[in-house]
Amino acid sequence: MYRLLSIEFQKIFKNRASKFLLLAYFILLTFIAFIVSIEFEIGTFKLRVADQGIFNFPYIWHFNTYIAAWFKLFLAIVVVSMMANEYSYGTLKQNLIDGLSKKEFILSKFYTILVFAFVSTLFVFILSLILGYSFSSYTEFGIVFSDLDYLFAFFLKLVAFFSFCLFLGILIKRSAFALGFLFILFVGEFMITQFLRWNLFPKTQVYHHVSQFFPLTSMSNLIDEPFSRLSAIKNIEATITGESVERVYDVQFLEIAIATSWIFIFIFLSYQLLKKRDL
């Protein structure tokens, strides 16, 4: 495993674009801390975001992992590019000539994905602890370390998304086209979901039961939006609708199972595609 990872990281750190994207990704993650300084002023009414409890334990685990997941595109570009560069620079063929099997080649990419996801999760964990202990009203041990399943969901979400990007990089060979296809799939899933919701199955939850098996949707479902948990949002919603809406925010086992299945599918398809392709 160490040998395979060392090969991959040598390739990544010799690429200036990849190094820049990695640095930009972790810098952007730290920008979550600047949310504390955001203040809205409407006439005499002032609202400081940090005072709304977003950095309270254990809510912070939900909020930070949801926000951090939006920055995964930076690492996705690195994953797609590291595969596209294998074809462009001929390093894939050279690695195979030097004795690396196709299975080891795919494993080296997957191990790199796991490292990216683990380091990102660890970074968010440390950042959340710092922000939480700085601003949270609750710092008891049992409260601080509850709801850590959001961190696991975040890790799984990154692994699934990067595995999909790896598959697209092998399938399409060109990073720009692979990322373009990713965007098209995102739009396609959204349009199909809306069609199911408003045309085929109106006023039912059937559309949700179907769309939860879509690859990108299954990854998105791992961590639900956290904003409607805030008391200020609940009060506004209750004022508009006249009633309180009950939602489930917990990480669900079925969603974990679906996302995990997609990881195995993407890695298996990547290996099969590489095995059958004439290089």
Image (spheres, rainbow, N blue to C red):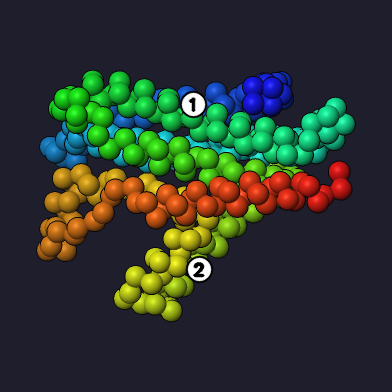
Q: Position of residue 189 (x, y in %)?
A: 52, 62
- Specify the quadrant that holds the N terminus: top right
Kind of residue indicated by mark 2: Ile
Earlier along the polypeptide chain: callout 2 or callout 1?
A: 1
* Residue drawn where x is 50% and y is 68% of the image: 192
Q: Is residue 215 left or right of residue 134?
A: right
Answer whether residue 89 is visible to the viewer in this image. Answer: no
Q: What distance separates the C-alpha of mark 2 from that of mark 1?
A: 34 Å
Crowdedness of circle 1 by 10 Å Cα count: few (<14), some, many (20+)? few
Count the labels in the image.
Answer: 2
User: What residue is disc 1 on?
Assistant: 119
- Tag shown at residue 192: 2
Residue 98 figure quarter? top right
Crowdedness of circle 2 by 10 Å Cα count: few (<14), some, many (20+)? few
> Depth check: 267 or 89 in front?
267
Answer whether residue 173 is visible to the viewer in this image. Answer: yes
Q: Is residue 155 above or below residue 273?
A: above
Residue 61 figure quarter? top left
> Depth check: 141 or 51 in front?
141
Q: Is residue 140 left or right of residue 161?
A: left
* Residue drawn where x is 47% and y is 43% of the image: 157
Marks 2, 1: nearer the viewer: 1
Q: Position of residue 162 (x, y in %)?
A: 57, 41
Kind of residue indicated by mark 1: Val
Q: Is residue 130 above or below residue 276?
A: above
Q: Position of residue 250 (x, y in %)?
A: 29, 48
